[in-house]
Amino acid sequence: MLSTMQDVQLNISRILEHGRKVHGRSTVTTWTGEAEPHRRTFAEIGDRAAQLANALRDELGVEPGSVLATLMWNNAEHVEAYFAIPSMGAVLHTLNLRLPPEQLVFIVNHAADRVVLVNGTLLPLLAPLLPQLPTVEHVVVSGAGDRSVLDGLDVRVHDYEALLAGRSDHYDWPELDERQAAAMCYTSGTTGDPKGVIYSHRSIYLHSMQVNMAESMGLTDRDTSLVVVPQFHVNAWGLPHATFMTGINLLMPDRFLQPAPLAEMIEREKPTHAAAVPTIWQGLLAEVTARPRDLTSMKQVTIGGAACPPSLMEAYEKLGVRLCHAWGMTETSPLGTMAHPPAGLSAEEEWPYRITQGRFPAGVEARLIGPGGDRLPWDGESAGELEVRGTWIAGAYYGGASGEPLRPADKFSADGWLKTGDVGVISADGYLTLTDRAKDVIKSGGEWISSVELENALMAHPEVAEAAVVAVPDDKWGERPLATVVLKDGATVDYTGLRTFLGQSIAKWQLPERWTFIEAVPKTSVGKFDKKVIRRQYADGVLDVTRLA
Ligand code: ADP
């Protein structure tokens, strides 16, 4: 029997029009580095998104299915592009501006981008690549920057504001099949070439509803969210789309991502929520420790993308800010889990739940697969690889314009689940604790050592700023941990002191013998510890390693 319900396509244009009308007074505030930030209402963003769509169709010949890239910071214009491009039936492709040039070239060519919308300040990055990007016909420049770097290149150059000026603020958004491509994002390619994930209108719509649920971020038009996580990193964790559903005000840092301007933004604009990877929060903590600032407007902070050390959570708790741990991936839109503790617990009882990666929402099914391919119980002890499925989880990667979708066997199970590459346990009440990435776990004499557990224990030492632990080859044990540690200014602790400290919480056989102090932990393009760089530095003998007896 078929239902009798209406079948309305879940199109992004519906989110846009809702935000424009119902939450027209909510604002997107963009930091400018000048006396005043720039403010634009959702109503204005809606008008301008329609103007942009008209310009793209009438001036640039953009058609349904055209792929348009953005090389932009988090700002109001980027939000306009987020809505205009998919709503008109084209595909938004956000480019990670921190990728090495050769990867950017690969990605733009693979996606066959026809247009690049770029912030003027990023032209020095884009211009030298353009001769290698034959599919790019148009470059649309927003904001200040030296445009002469584009002179003589074989592209048509447009000014963003000039394109919009005088255009109609009405666009007849087409009724699209909700399964159609809306946006694409390439994984940061920690191994091999980057792989493209294509989100549908439906997946983004449903994911946005999840972001807005109380068990996820649960914000309303009384909130302002400081979106530090870049719009090129998994759609800024879904926030720009989600906000137009519920009227959450956005505070966008543009290119001012250093700890000092972030602290100033928070103190002046008083966001109630923020989202960023742990590295950002580590940096901000050092800043406000040196120069105290009031961060207490932030009632909730979503932290994810890499494991959040419990010590970091504790440090922010003392500043009156509650960090909420979340797990996700480019392939999961990204909302996978969030660590809200169950009801009815004291603050002390909540703590063990808060330091997990969190609970799965109803829309994400999870299972753990053991080393032999067997399915493991949710008992908080059995460790295996996490596999997930759901309406906003990728089922394949983009195979290029003429190719079939790619389903590599190491990323997708035969029955279609996503293999996350993350290893962990799930408790009987559904809380996920990740112990490592499959490729980072240290395999010592047939036993597994969690690099994350060692890092968290090290970062709990008061004189340690950051620590990354990697597996290195060992004649006797196969692999052993190497501890690379960044000390805080003025620290006096030595390797033996750190090992003794670790011994208080870590089993003796897991304690590292190999130690090195480093200036900074190498980071990936989205600010995570780049362990493959550390492993290579060790292999190349460039680290000054001390071996304790
Ligand atoms: P990349 O794989 O290039 O880092 P993603 O941003 O998609 O790109 O990263 C997803 C991965 O980040 C996850 O598979 C997981 O290993 C890690 N990750 C994300 N959130 C967390 C978290 N809260 N705790 C531990 N690891 C996390």
Image (spheres, helix red, strand yellow):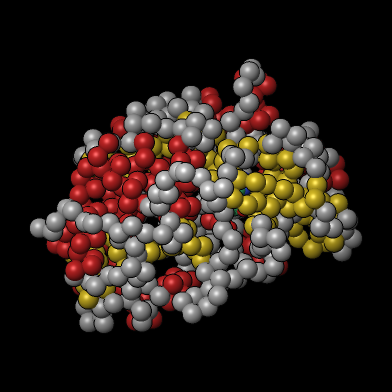
**Taking the image as drawn, is residue 94 in sight?**
no
Q: Is 199 left, or right, of 23 in this rendering? A: right
Query: Residue 267, position in %: x, y?
Result: 34, 31
Q: Is 202 left, or right, of 436 in this rendering? A: left
In the rendered view, tell whether residue 191 sits above or below residue 315.
below
In the rendered view, tell whether residue 214 sits above or below residue 368.
above
Residue found at the far front of this picture = 1
Q: Which of 244 and 385 is in front in this view?
A: 244
**Taking the image as drawn, is residue 349 in sight?**
yes
Q: Nearer the viewer, residue 251 or 465?
A: 251
Residue lying at 69% horizontally and 67% vertically, measured from the top left? 409
Residue lying at 65% horizontally and 46% vertically, measured from the top left? 365
Query: Residue 466, position in %: x, y?
Result: 60, 45
Residue lying at 68% horizontally and 53% vertically, measured from the top left? 387
Residue lying at 53% horizontally and 24% vertically, measured from the top left? 318
The quadrant where residue 147 appears = bottom left
Query: Residue 13, position in %: x, y?
Result: 32, 51
